[in-house]
Image (cartoon, grey):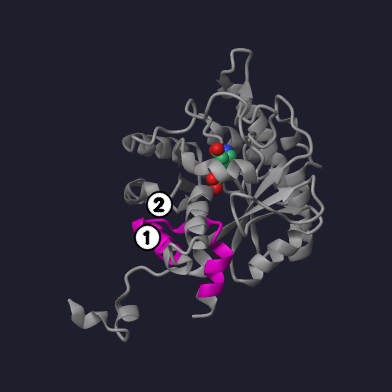
Amino acid sequence: MRRLRSSKFRPFIRETTLDVKDLICPVFVDETISEPFEINSMPGYFRHPLETVADEASSILELGIPAVILFGIPEKKDETGSHACGDDDVVQKAVRAIKQQVGDDLIVMTDLCLCEYTSHGHCGIVNEKQEILNDPTLEILAKTAVSHTRAGADIVAPSGMMDGMVGAIRRALDDNDFKDIPIMSYAAKYCSAFYGPFREAAGSGYAFGDRASYQMDPGNADEALREVALDIEEGADIIMVKPALPYLDIIYRVKKKFKMPTAAYHVSGEYAMIKAAAQNGWLDERGVVYESLISIKRAGADMILTYFAKDMARELNSE
Ligand code: PBG
């Protein structure tokens, strides 16, 4: 076996390779700030103000990364997340700014969820018994999808794990002349402690309870296949598994069974762990990032949403 492990042959026989084109870069856009703001639990990662979010998008495209996914931090939150769906709300403004400045070469995806916009921080409408209501939430998500698309979004990405969300969004897009806009569904999204830093990043911590009534139980794998099947039936074009590294088996099974364009989300906690260990000198950041991302790809992901997208792109470009 060692004959092909020399530095000459290793790259030659490598079965899985990482490409800049595999990467999707998350971008946080915050309407309450005027300067980039570093996220405490995600060292080296920033929220961007509306004024400069297009510069950030442009620097991402310059590295050869084909796509960004936008997360909005609104000025005002309320019970029903009503500032998610206005044409002049934060994500809609950011999409327009990016499209105007960067042009159409960059794929602009928008994360579609209410948790950044609701005062209680849950991903849906809540009743007086603190239950998260499914169907009333669908209407708002559908409306939000249409407004993102009207602003110029190329792909919408519902992440709230409401049942029927893909179908509701597909119908709304079709009815509004957006038949060509694909949906990337967060199809198998687990109720994960690895989202901790994201809640600081996006200002979406919740006031009560947890997300277990809508996100998946980490113990379940067959259920992920049912989730994915439903989303495909409802019209999802790209499906996602999230988080990534702790769920490589799910990525593998989903890709094997459905053979769909499959995305994996290397989430905020996965970023924070590596950063923290690297800052302590306990892990080699470059090596661990490469190994994490190549493993996610090897498991079956076609594309990876990762906060290391820019770093990885620089690395790949310099090879
Ligand atoms: C919103 C959303 C979350 C993430 C992406 N979209 C948070 C959550 O569901 O709690 C997490 C991303 C990350 O941790 O990097 N629903």
Q: Is residue 153 visible?
A: no
Helix, strand or loop at label 2? It is helix
Q: Is residue 7 visible?
A: yes
Can you give x and y, in whole percent of width and height, for residue 63 in the image? 61, 71
Residue contact at pointers 1 and 2, CB within 8 angstroms: yes
Q: Vertically, is 308 above or below 262? A: below
Residue at the disc numbered 1: 295
Lateral position of residue 107 relative to residue 232, left or right: right
Query: Any magenta on residue 306?
Result: yes
Given residues 277 and 118, the one toward you in this image is: 277
Q: Vertically, is 12 above or below 189? A: below
Which residue is found at the position 40% from the left and 70% from the top?
A: 17
Can you give x and y, in whole percent of width and height, for residue 234 in the image? 49, 36
Range drawn in magenta:
289-315
Residue type at mark 2 is Leu
Can you give x and y, in whole percent of width and height, for residue 258 in the image? 36, 47
Which residue is found at the position 50% from the left and 74% from the top?
A: 316
Q: Earlier in the sequence, mark 1 or mark 2?
A: 2
Lateral position of residue 139 relative to residue 6, left or right: right
Of helix, strand and loop, which mostly describes the magenta segment?
Answer: helix
Which residue is found at the position 78% from the left and 34% from the top?
A: 76
**Which residue is most to the bottom?**
8
Q: Mark 2 Cα within 10 Å, few/some/many (few <14, many 20+)?
A: some
Q: Which of the 4 image quadrants contains residue 8?
A: bottom left
User: How far is mark 1 from mark 2, CA to CA?
Assistant: 8 Å
Q: Vertically, is 51 above or below 224? A: below
Residue at the disc numbered 2: 245
Residue type at mark 1 is Ser
Query: Any magenta on residue 154?
Result: no
Given residues 133 and 47, the one toward you in this image is: 47
Please tell me in which quarter of the rendered image ligand 1 is found: top right
